[in-house]
């Protein structure tokens, strides 16, 4: 995975999209030497969404199995979502 500045990404955007699309390479975008975003191919994105869905399903299964219901805040904390 390569990390590049936002200025470099802007100058070479089409190339970065091609790397993500055709080579499945992830490109980290940095601002002031801090990672702020990632360019990934659509297939990678779909895989991440599928993993997220599987994880959320497992959490729901656990809740139902244990007959324990969580508050919205508890669920958000567990799946790393900021409310």
Image (cartoon, rainbow, N blue to C red):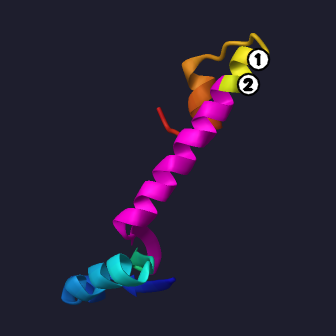
> Would you say 46 lies left or right of 61 here?
left
> Would you say 61 lies left or right of 16 here?
right
- In magenta segment, residue 39: yes
Q: In the image, what residue occupies the spot 76% across and 17% down?
A: 65
Asked if one can make out residue 31 in the rendered structure from this viewpoint, the answer is no
Quarter of the image holding residue 57?
Answer: top right
- In magenta segment, residue 3: no
- Neighbour class for label 2 at 10 Å: few (<14), some, many (≥20)? few
Whether residue 55 is situated above or below residue 62 in the rendered picture: below
> Would you say 76 lies left or right of 5 here?
right
- Marks 2 and 1: in contact by CB < 8 Å? yes
Query: What label sits on residue 65 in the rendered view?
Result: 1
Q: Which residue is mark 2?
A: 62
- Neighbour class for label 1 at 10 Å: few (<14), some, many (≥20)? few
Q: In the image, what residue occupies the spot 28% across and 89% down?
A: 8
The picture places residue 52, in percent across and down from the top left corner, at 54, 45
2 or 63: nearer the eye? 63
Q: In the image, what residue occupies the spot 70% across and 20% down?
A: 63
Whether residue 43 is situated above or below residue 33 in the rendered picture: above
Q: Which residues are magenta?
A: 33-60
Quarter of the image holding residue 24?
Answer: bottom left
The picture places residue 79, in percent across and down from the top left corner, at 59, 38
* Mark 1: secondary structure: helix
57 or 68: nearer the eye? 57
Q: Residue furthest right?
A: 66
């Amino acid at each position: 995975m390569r990390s590049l500045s936002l200025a470099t990404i802007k100058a070479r955007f089409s190339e970065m999209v091609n790397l993500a699309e055709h080579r499945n390479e992830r490109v980290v975008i940095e601002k002031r030497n801090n990672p702020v975003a990632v360019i990934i191919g659509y297939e990678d994105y779909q895989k991440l969404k599928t993993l997220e869905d599987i994880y959320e399903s497992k959490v729901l299964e656990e809740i139902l199995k244990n007959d324990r219901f969580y508050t919205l805040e508890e669920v958000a904390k567990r799946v790393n979502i900021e409310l």
